[in-house]
Each structure stands twice: as C-alpha cells, then as structure tokens.
Amino acid sequence: MNRPLRYKIVTILLLLASMQAMAQQAWYIDGYHGGVWGHYPDWNTRFMADQLRQHPNWYINIEIEPETWDRVTTIDQEAFRDFKKLYEEGRIEYVNPSYAQGYLFNISGESIIRQFRYGIQHLHHYFPQAVFSTYSSEEPCFTSALPQILRSFGFKYASLKNPNTCFGGYTRAHGGELVNWIGPDGSSILTSPRYAVEALSNKSTWQTIAWNNSREYINAAHSAGMQHPVGMTLQDAGWKGGPFKGDSAAYTLWHHYFDHIAVNDKATDWQVSQEDILVSLVWGSQVTQQIAQRVRQAENKILQSEKLAAMAAWNKQTPWPQQALDTAWRTLLLSEHHDCWIVPYNGKPGNTWADKVAAWTTATRRICDSIDQLSVPVTGQPEAITVCNTLGLDRKEVVRAELPKGWNAAKVLDAQGKPVASQLVNDGILFLANVPAMGNQVYHLVNTAARPTVTTAVKQQGSTYILETDLYRITIDTLHGGIIKSLIAKQLHNKELAGDGFNALRGNFYDRGGFRSSMETPVTVQVQEAGALRIKLLLTGQIAGDSFTQTLTVTAGDPKIDNQLQINWKENTGIGQTMAPGTYKWELPAKPFYNDSLKLLALFPSTFTQPHIAKDAPFDVTESQLDNTFYNRWDSIKNNVLLNWVDLTDGSGKYGMALFSDHTTSYAHGENFPLALDIQYSGMGLWGRNYTINGPTAIHYAIVPHASNWEQGRICMENSKWNEPLLVRAGAAATAGQSMFRLEGGAVQVSSVTWQGDELLIRLFNPSRKESQASLSFPTAISSAALVELNGEDRTSINIIKNNRQWETPVTLPPFGIRTIKITKHS
C-alpha cells in the first residue's frame, strides 16, 4: 500500500475515533515512556507492535530514548520492522525526541538544544521520515524558554501535562482547553495546559485527576465550557496491559488532537514564568549535589572546548573534532537523564544512576581535555604563558600560572616586553592578563633573584580580620564562626551590605539537639595570600561538632567574593525535618525534604529593605512573585530552583547582591528570612529512601554586590566569566593577540561556537528584558552570513558591513532571545 493511501486510511480511522469521542466528549493520549537506559525490556517492541495490530483503534504517543533503537535493531530486527511500519502508517507519534529525557529546568540552555539536536539526529537514522510536531513528556520536563527552542526545531504544538508521573512536580493549573504558551522572548506555541480544573489527586502524590480521564475530571472540564478535554498517561515501557483504558476510550495522537479535534477551539495567551514550573527534587542531599556539580562542570567544560576548537579550525591550526565532540556530548546528555536526578540510588552497587553520572561526566571532561590540548598548540618555552579567552568580549582579569621548575620568583612581561602587575603566591604567580575576545594572549616570565616585599592587604584587629581591595572592605569575625561582620562596597557609595550573621551556616541537626550554627564556635584563620592582586583566607571552624573550612577569596577588579566551603563530616547525621522511621508513605503529601527552612543553609542577611528576588533559568531570568520559598507538601510546591544564580535587589533599586552556585540546587528567602543557599539535607527522600551523608561536602559559591538590578549589574555576564574563566597554558601560542571575532551589543552573549562542514555557527543569547542590537566583528574577511533555525533551515540572510578592516554582521535579538548565525569564511 502506498504511503499517501495509508495516511488517508489512518486519518479516516482517527476521525471515526474522534466522532465516537465527541459523543463521549473526552479524548485520551496513551503511549509509552522509557528507554534502554531507563526501562525497556527486550520484548517491548514486539509487544507494542502486536498490541497495535490487535487494537486497530489504539494510537500511541512515545517518548523512548533514541539509543533504545540501537539495541532493538540488534536483538529483534523483525519486531523493529513491524513497529516501523506502524509508525509509517501513522499509528505512532514521537512526542519527545530528546536524547535522554532531561528535566530541562535544571540544565543549561545549550544542553537543552543539544538534547533535541542529537536526539532528532539519532532518531532520523531509524525513522528517516519522522516529523516532530508535538512536544509532550510523562515527567515534568519543562522550562519557560521551551517555545522558542521547540519552534526553531519545527515543532508546532506542546503539552504541559504530566498527569500520571508528578513525583518531581507539575505545572501550574491554568486556563482552559488550549493556550498559546508564550516564552520569555515572545515566541508562542499552541499548547494543551494542565487545565485550571485539573486538580491534583487527593489519593496520591504523583497524579492529577486527568491521569485516567476520571469522571470528576471530565465533568469539571465540561462545566468550564471545554468541548474537547483530553487526559493522558504515557505508560512505563514494560507495562503489559496494552491500551491503558481498554478498548472503550477515544485514543488519539497529539498532533491529530491539535489538527483535527481542537482545531477550532479558542486559545488564550499565557506568558509562562519559570515559577509556573512547579518542580522539586531532594535538594541539598549529597548525592543530588554531586550529580548537579558534575553535570555543571561538564557543561562548562564542553562549551569552552568547543570554542577553543572552533578558534583552532578558524585559524587552520587543527581540524574541527566533530567525532570527539559528539562522543563528549553523548555522555553529558546521558548524565542529564531525569532518572539520574530523581532516583540516583537506583541500580546495582557500583552502577547506580549516581555512579553512571560520575563515569559519564568524567568521560566528557577527559575528551574535552584532549581537545583543549590540540586546540591550543604551544611551543615548549617554559617561561611563556598563553592565556585564552572563550567569551565574546575583551577581558582584563587576574590569572594564575605555575612557575618553571626551580624558580623561586619571577616577574611578568606582556607581548611588548612591558611589565605586568603580578603577585607571587605558593608555587605560582598571579598576574593581570589582558586578553582579546575569542582569542588568546602570550606573556613571558622573567626569573628574578628574590621575592619582593609584599605590602599586606589584610590586617588583624583583635578578633577580627580586615580585608581591603579596590572594591571592598570586608571584616571577618573570628569569634563567631568567621562570619562577615561588615561588607563595605566601595564602588557603591561605601554601602554596608552585610546584616547580622552574614555567611553563617545554620540548620536543624535533629540527631544532635536541634538548630546548630557555625557562629557557636570560633574559627582559626590562615592568611594564604595577601597582595595587591588577590587576598585568600582559610577559615577553619566547627558546625555541630564537625569541622569545616571556608576559603574566602577576593581579587582586584573582580566583583565576586568567592567562597569554597568544605564540611568534613565524621559520620552520617540527620539534617532538616525529621520523620519517624516507618511513617513514610507514598501517598502522604507532607514530605520532610520539601522543608528548606530546616536544612543546613548558608545565610546572607543584608541591609536591604523591601528586597526583590530575580533568578536565572535556561535562556531566561525570572522576576520572582513569591512571598517566600517555603513549602512542605507535594500539593503546594513552589519553584525555588537556583540554576546558576539568584539576585537580591534593594527596594529602592539602587543596590543588589547576587548569589552564584556551582550547581543547580534550591535557595531560600522570605519575609524575616534572609537569602540563603541550600548546603545540606540528610534524611527521608522520595519513595522512603534515606538520603545520607557519605563523605565531605564541598560547595563553591560566590557573592556579587552590584549597583541597581541584575541587568544593570551585568550579573549574567559576571556569571559567564565565572563559568568560563580565562584558561592558562604553559608555552607560547602561534596566534597570540588575535581575535576570531568580537561581539558588540551590550548584554548579548556568545552561547556557543561550532562548525558544521565549512560553515561556522555562532549562537547568541540576549539576557535582557529589552531588545538588543548586536554585531559580530571579524578581523578576517567573511563571504556570507545568515540566521538559521535550530533545525538547520535558513531563516534570513544578514548584510555584511565592511568597516575599517572589520567585517561586521548586525543582528537584532528580542528580550531573552537566541539567534544562530551561520558564517562562511572568505576562501
């Protein structure tokens, strides 16, 4: 039978099913969720194909991990052929083609793009004619910026429902049958939301009433004027029941629902905030922390490696390492699988999800290390230092280099032989590097006979230490746990920012008598560095009987007050809200790990009045509308997720203070409760699992005071500098002082730089509430420039402006918009 005829028959059958449902006035989305990494028995493909043949009115929507088909085609080719035929006949719709079914809200925007890009690419190998028109997920795999990403990949529709797997959360109930989901950039995608009448179940903590098209749900929808309500469950691959609601339900595919059933229904506009994505994990638990840290490290590493490799290919030094990068991305994407984050302990000892993440992210970083070595070829001169910059703007920052073996002291000269400000530190030297955008610079060390006398920038006055830089005057109180007693921001009219107990640790140690604080005991102080470029103090104290260290670092010209915290736990101890053994039940909405107010927190009380919170999300910044971040029940989840940073702005709008974290976690804030970072939870988690402490806790965070709000304070750019530091290599690079390109355009940032064949792809992101005009300026001739979609389709050409030996490509970006520019270098 030819394909057009098959599609006509399937369309007729779907329309007949729709007519049946119109009498019933309810439709149902059935299908399967899982894959070779999550759950997918070898018999599952044959089972789905046979069930579809046995039930001609059944249609399935699938989110099956793309790598699943690698195994299926190896062990059961006949089953795959039958399944593929059913797919081609229109009985199956692929609704989530992402590579590893990540939650999305907890990873970078670039990772989200690669999840879809690599997933779609892999699926097209097995289903060449596949069209991905609707995004839907059984888990709460949502984030506010999805509309522009989905539309750029060619999607037409989306669903914000996950009625039968809400363990990790759900979206806010809103609206009626259809909404235009509007993202932060203004992009819109027609969406089936979790209806305003789609209540959470009162019998479980993982369902809404739409999971089985309950009579309560259908009646509520009809009473609200909805003519075409739809319920949904994507069954776990491996369930053996076949059609989830038997043969009586009106099953449909998502694209058919939008194209033919609800096609004439009115859609209201909904500007979805990240705070409408109501999600929660066991934040603060050691296993979740370590997963998040490993993923963040790998994300930052691979994006820098791509940029270094792109520069090397541009300069014709080394070929573009596509295969190596594909391999590195694969293991990173797998580490973003939702099961890594929500069931980290699942699996055999040594092969749990947490173990897999450790192995996968290590593999990614090792590949990237190899790419970096090849991308920055240097001479073997031990006295030469190459500093690389992977951001789109020139940078002048302090870096650290190793001294050649046997050297005791040195000074630093720039490429013109002029002395550079420097500071000797243990086994190395700090110096002020000035590096062009997307390029590198070479410096030279000169051996000197003796170390110069250093004027200390740290003073001890009784029980306090005072640190002085060009930006701050910081007072450390050693008697009370090393808190920052005073934080004067010199560039902000000498504003005092620190309230009482700034940078203290506090939490409920329910096995050790209740609330305990680092302020209960004094700290010892070791001044590790105290020069004009950098001050570093090592504070050693105790919290509830266990020792901790804080390495506090402030650097000249750098607004970040950096802190490396390590707590050396002697044993597992309960921290947070207690729960009596044997009392945990899946269906009870109150769960102890939701209660952040009792977890061990790093506290940052400020002098601000009527403070306002903003926080970043993938390709978005959310202006918080929460009165506070606290909840302790599944049916009242709030989005208190800290992806990269959270910002506190004074009610006057004159001053602000951002908090950076090295991993996705939660933050706390509310009336009479200061901004706080989740440091540790130990206790009952999901499914009654005890989330324990198994070793030291190490967390890297920073405080960033600034003028005005997060946007005027350039917090997104400061965070990019934190995530992509200047890279230092021993030896001299051949391309010293050259820029691949420079980005002009205020807030706009370079998100990624890659090659596709002979064409360079540069992705820009505008982290601003305003439209921005940006321009890429190339010192080398380029022959063409165009905007392209994420699926590779050309969008529009860009005029190239020749301006004083520079080739410029102007681009307009909407608020929070991303744009991908394809550049062809002049041959």
Image (cartoon, helix red, strand yellow):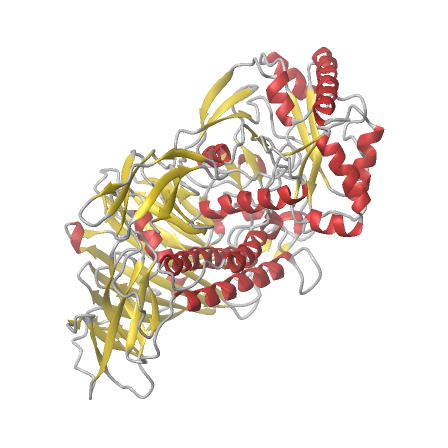
* Of residues 735 and 476, the one drawn nearer to the viewer in this rendering: 735
* Of residues 453 and 748, the one drawn nearer to the viewer in this rendering: 748
Q: For the N terminus, give its image quadrant.
A: top right
Tell me: 609 left or right of 5: left
**Residue sitting at x 46%, y 47%:** 110
Q: Position of residue 534 (x, y in %)?
A: 25, 68
**Residue sitting at x 79%, y 46%:** 77
Q: Position of residue 822 (x, y in %)?
A: 39, 43
**Figure quadrant of residue 744:** top left
**Residue sitting at x 60%, y 21%:** 258
Compared with 67, 547 (above or below) is below
Compared with 373, 644 (above or below) is above
Tell me: 341 left or right of 380: right
Residue 621 visible in rendering: no
Tell me: 3 left or right of 785: right
Residue at the extreme right: 54
* Of residues 305 and 680, the one drawn nearer to the viewer in this rendering: 305
**Figure quadrant of residue 472:** bottom left
Residue 164 visible in rendering: yes
Q: Position of residue 740 (x, y in %)?
A: 31, 55
Q: Position of residue 570 (x, y in %)?
A: 53, 71
Compared with 147, 662 (above or below) is below
Q: How many marks?
A: 0
Compared with 449, 41 (above or below) is above
* Of residues 403 and 543, the one drawn nearer to the viewer in this rendering: 403
Residue at the extreme front: 827
**Figure quadrant of residue 50:** top right
